[in-house]
Image (cartoon, rainbow, N blue to C red):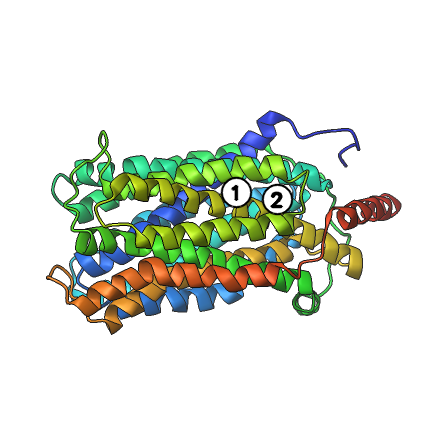
Amino acid sequence: MAIQPHERLRLREKLGYGVGDLASATFINFLGYFLLYFYVDLGGLAPAAIGLMLLITKLIDAFTDPMMGAIADRTRTKWGRYRPYLLWGAVPFSISGVLVFAAPDMGANGKLVWAYVTYSLAMLAYTVVNVPYSGLLGVISPHSSERTSATAYRMLFYSISGISIGMFATTLVRELGNGDEARGILLTMCVICALGLVFWLVAFSTTRERIPPARENAPILHDLAILVRTPAWLIVALAAILTPLAIAARASSALFYFKYVAKDDGTPVFLFLDRVGLFYTALALGQLTGVLVANVLRNRFEKRDLVMAAGVVKVSAIVLFYMLPLDAVWPQTLVQLFVGIGFGMIMVLAYSMFTDVAEYVEWKSGQQMTGLAISASIFAIKAGVAFGAAVPGFVLAYTGFIAGETQSQLALDGIEMAFALVPAIAIVPAGLAVFFYRIDRRMIAQIEADLSKRRANVG
């Protein structure tokens, strides 16, 4: 049943939809923060080997993400096209996350094989549930304003996941591990995955699909050909790769930065938070602030302009953080808050732009490919996260990092490069690309009016 022009999504449904990203974001953020450290600094594997693993899994995602989106587009059940996968994929999602950090003691080669297999399975399970979850946003309402509002709730919970990791992850690792960091990381992931299972079931049970599916879909390759010829999607995809790349590179190298460059020994500096926890918490609080700011400003300014402004804030804050003294804990924390503000604004607007692009493609081509368009965009984000996590591994290997040892000046410079220079540089071309994005509020209004008439005629 289509949503009426005056109907708004209820708070319960927005909250229920948003909770799904509490499962998804906590899962992927914890992997991003701890995976490289777990296998390199604690596991003794070569940084380049783990970096290569992250890149190879993204090559696999290049096929599985769009394929999953196309499969979801063509799924027909009593629950809809996208919602069923939140139910079906919840258990594999949770089990796969635990397996990543359950590496047995089987030597370097065996541990590397374990990392490849389990991380690939985890990313596949993540795809099965997260791609349809993102596709659901495109059919939860035919109105861009309602989808943007739902996106804001999604990003709200994304920020809450970041705050939770920042405030509690390193503490849980320390307390649950009782002196064994690897065991602490595994047990913390167990907690995250158990909660994630519950959150996915909540998201499934509280949401609805309101845009009816097409009676039949074109061949997948035909849809893909249309998508890659759409300039708006190419622009959003490029920004979706580079923006998360910057945050992921910074996040995955943070543990190395504080341990080896800032010489932090893990002592709490504020309540129970050590410097790493404070760093992640500031980022997440900034993300939450950015989500709220973007949600207020989106009705007054074009999304394109807000994304570019947020990029300037983010780059400026990263550069300023790099220029501050190593022991300037609170100035660094304040600056990191602004890194999060820029990132939060960009992400809430980007997800909203994904659904706008999906409707634009349907409007222009007559082909309904919501899941495919959004899944291809999600792949871009995942690729950015993977590249961001992989780049520090390659930089550490190139500059001679040796786990657990006193580092050479070149290795320390490499850590700082991965932590500051790479993230700052990545944002610049993303902002330049978004400058050419042309789907504005006036066009969206026309698209919604035309598609509403078209769907009514089909019905």
Q: Which mark is residue 388?
A: none
Residue 222 picture quarter: bottom right
Going 53% across and 64% down the picture, which residue do you hit? 429
Number of residues whose C-alpha sits closer than 10 Å to that of mark 2, classed few (under 14), some (14–19) or many (20 or more)? many
Quarter that holds the C terminus: top right
Q: Which mark is residue 136?
A: 2
Residue 204 picture quarter: top right
Q: Position of residue 94 (x, y in %)?
A: 38, 44
Q: Is residue 350 left or right of residue 190?
A: right
Going 42% across and 57% down the picture, which residue do you hit? 246
Mark 2 and 1 residues: CB-CB less than 8 Å, in contact? Answer: yes
Q: Which mark is residue 86?
A: 1
Number of residues whose C-alpha sits closer than 10 Å to that of mark 1, classed few (under 14), some (14–19) or many (20 or more)? many
Can residue 386 be seen here?
A: no
Mark 1: which secondary structure? Answer: helix
- Residue kind at label 1, given as amino acid type: Leu
State which mark lies toward you, 2 or 1: 2
Going 23% across and 59% down the picture, which residue do you hit? 39
**Up-down relation of residue 162 to residue 390 (above or below):** above
Quarter that holds the N terminus: top right
- Pick whichever of labels 2 and 1 is earlier in the sequence: 1
Q: Position of residue 381 (x, y in %)?
A: 50, 56
